[in-house]
Image: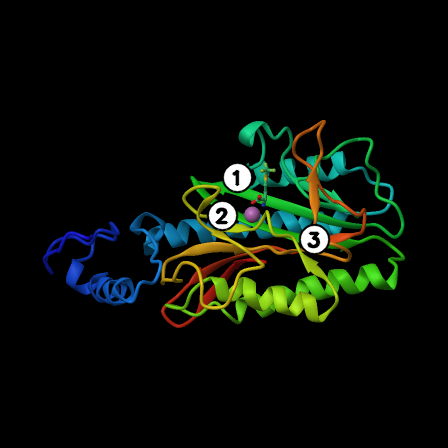
Amino acid sequence: MFKKMRDNAPCWCKSGKRYGECHKEYDQMISRLKEAKKKIPSRKIIKNEMQIQGIRESSKINIAVLDYVAEHIRIGMSTEEINTLVYEKTTEMGGIPAPLNYKGFPKSVCTSIGSQVCHGIPSVNDVLEDGDIINVDVSTIYNGYFSDSSRMFMMGNVHPEARRLVEVTKESINVGLSQVVPWQPIGNVGAAIHEFAQENGYTVVREIGGHGVGLQFHEEPFVCFVSDWNTGMIMAPGMVFTIEPMINMGEADIFIDADNEWTVYTDDGMPSAQWEVTVLVTEEGYEILTY
Ligand code: MF3
Ligand code: CO
């Protein structure tokens, strides 16, 4: 597997530090886990301190953009106007909206209302109404580094059942975060979230999940939110990924809009909610980069 490196050689993570003082112990741990047949992360998704700093800076813009949306979002506003808010705030701060032209996505942000699960495309025709719940998913590139987060907004008088869905989904992020423990398998994050959602009478979308992020928009691993305990890739310090469960009030089944080939809906037309954070695995636990 890994080439044996000399202690004095520069570390493979490109920190500029000597290997013996950088990722040597890390590699020893990885070797042990590999022998124990665990799924280990490839080196290319392990970020060094400089890259982490870059992702932190990107995340600051990402958070500021969502704060800006939170300040301005209101009943009567179209999702196209949210798109404008995101584009203008992001570019004003020196960033680039990652979704824009990503695999043909036509806008700067995803806006998903009600039974839309994710990847809603902003439009002048979609106007926020009293009682709507909406997810605004902002992804940012700054200085080449990617960050990603989303929040739910509740417009005016939201039905108590929809409100509970939004709140439980928000709480599920904390449930997932509690399982971000270095050297443990990432399946624990999804297993905990899935159990929590089920206890609350909800279902979790299976086909779409979180992802590694930072140097690219979507990196390994895929983060499933219906995973089994003690499965999946080991969470190693230096990994950055998103926790972004989509939780449905009704059944878990979904379909993709055949016209735009993007927007995902619940099959049964019941509401869906999603919150998303970007998290860094550290030696001690984790650091939340976006929220
Ligand atoms: N945060 C979403 C994701 O990671 C953003 C998708 S942007 C889109 O899937 F362009 F792909 F829609
Ligand atoms: Co994401």
Which one is earlier in the sequence, the residue at label 3 or at label 1?
1
Look at label 1 and name its amino acid: Gly
Decide: few, some or many residues near mark 1? Use Cα within 10 Å; few <14, some 14-19, many ≥20. many
Q: Is residue 133 above or below residue 24?
A: above
Which one is earlier in the sequence, the residue at label 1 or at label 2?
2
Q: Quadrant of ligand 1?
A: top right
The residue pinned by badge 1 equals: 95
The quadrant of the picture occupied by the C terminus is bottom right
In this rendered view, identify the residue nearer to me: 128 or 31.
31
Look at label 3 and name its amino acid: Ala
Q: Return the x and y of residue 170 as percentages of the image width and height.
A: 67, 63
Q: Return the x and y of residue 221 as percentages of the image width and height.
A: 44, 51
What is the CA distance from the residue labelled 3 to the residue labelled 2? 33 Å
Q: Is residue 170 left or right of residue 50?
A: right
Q: Secondary structure at mark 1?
A: loop
The residue pinned by badge 3 equals: 252
Q: Return the x and y of residue 48 as percentages of the image width and height.
A: 32, 54
What is the CA distance from the residue labelled 3 to the residue labelled 1? 35 Å
Which color scheme does this rendered protein use? rainbow
Q: Is residue 192 left or right of residue 110?
A: left
The residue pinned by badge 2 equals: 58
What is the CA distance from the residue labelled 1 to the residue labelled 2? 8 Å
